[in-house]
Amino acid sequence: MACLILLSVGILFNLFGCIGLIRLPDVYNRLQAATKCVTLGTCSILIGVLVHFGFNDAGVKAMVAIPILFFASTVAAHALIRGAYGFGIRLGDRSVKDDYKDAVK
Amino acid sequence: MRYLTLFILSLIMWLLLTFKLTIPNLIVGTVVAAITALIFARYFIRNVHKFLEPKRYFWLFVYFFVFLWACLKANIDVAYRVLHPAMPIRPGIVKVRTTLRSDFARTLLANSITMTPGTISVDIIGDDLYIHWIYVHSEDPEVYSSLILGQFEKYIKRIVE
């Protein structure tokens, strides 16, 4: 039962992440949806797998995957957002502040 | 000392991943961990004796729950902004100053910031972290610094430094 709830929550958050990826205006905001919602969603699915299998080889692999996923997705987001800025993609029209512009020059 | 610590950590990781306590598996794991330690130990953190201080593990445990709570809030916040018909976003890049010194602590802080309320760290130049924020709540540097860094900085200081 707990396993089913965790899996449903995970898939729901992944869905929100995908909706955000389509709806939000520019690459920076899309990365926000892509990193946060998708990482928590996938972690939730992995914990669901752990609950389902218990502490045997499949469950422990799911548990080990969580910190790896966490570091991989944050580092990937950082690399993508910095790369996008370096490539010269402007912030969207609704942006209100850009401190980074002065620092790069 | 660094080589030994990284070797032990790699071996534990290998045993968790394969999850078999047989002799051939242990031999393969030892060889793989030794190769990993030989190649990557020079990028490993310097003061490995910190691994032996129990109070750091206690703060890591506390930090885990603080972080989990912030992470859940972040996800609900971003999901709300995505699903709201008018999309209440006000994005921008802000600059905050950190007092953490070591590279590892800064990496941990930047990763934590990426996972919490509507923020992604873009770059670190000197002592300044540049952070993309999906909703800039305030233009005042003191207010947004405390909003973004929150409690992370003080816990990370206790864990790592």
Image (cartoon, coloured by chain):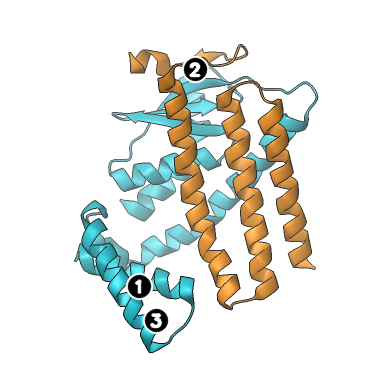
Chain colours: A orange, B cyan
The answer for how far apart the CA atoms under marks 2 and 3 are is 49 Å
In which quadrant will I find the N terminus of chain A? bottom right
Q: How many C-alpha atoms fall within 10 Å of the one at disc 1: few (<14), some, or many (≥20)? A: many
The residue lying toward the viewer, choosing from B43 and B28, is B28
Circle 2: element type: loop
| Label 2 in the same subunit as label 1 | no
Q: Please state the horizontal and vertical placement of residue B107, each as a whole percent of the image.
A: 37, 43
| Label 1 in the same subunit as label 3 | yes
Q: Which residue is mark 3?
A: B25
Q: Residue at x 26, y 57 (%)?
A: B40
Instruction: Decide if residue B153 is in sight here.
Output: no
* Chain at tag 2: A
Q: Quadrant of residue B119?
A: top right
| Label 2 in the same subunit as label 3 | no
In which quadrant will I find the C terminus of chain A? top left
Q: Earlier in the sequence, mark 1 or mark 3?
A: 1
Q: Please state the horizontal and vertical placement of residue A71, each as a whole percent of the image.
A: 46, 49
Which residue is most to the bottom? B23
Q: Tag on residue B11?
A: 1
Instruction: Decide if residue A101 is in sight here.
Output: yes
Q: Please state the horizontal and vertical placement of residue B95, each as a whole percent of the image.
A: 42, 23
Which circle, 2 or 3, is nearer the viewer?
A: 3
Give the amino acid type for the residue marked by disc 3 in the picture. Asn
Q: Tag on residue A89?
A: 2
The answer to whether the residues at label 2 and label 1 have Cβ atoms under 8 Å apart is: no
Q: Residue at x 68, y 39 (%)?
A: A17
Q: Tally the marks.
A: 3
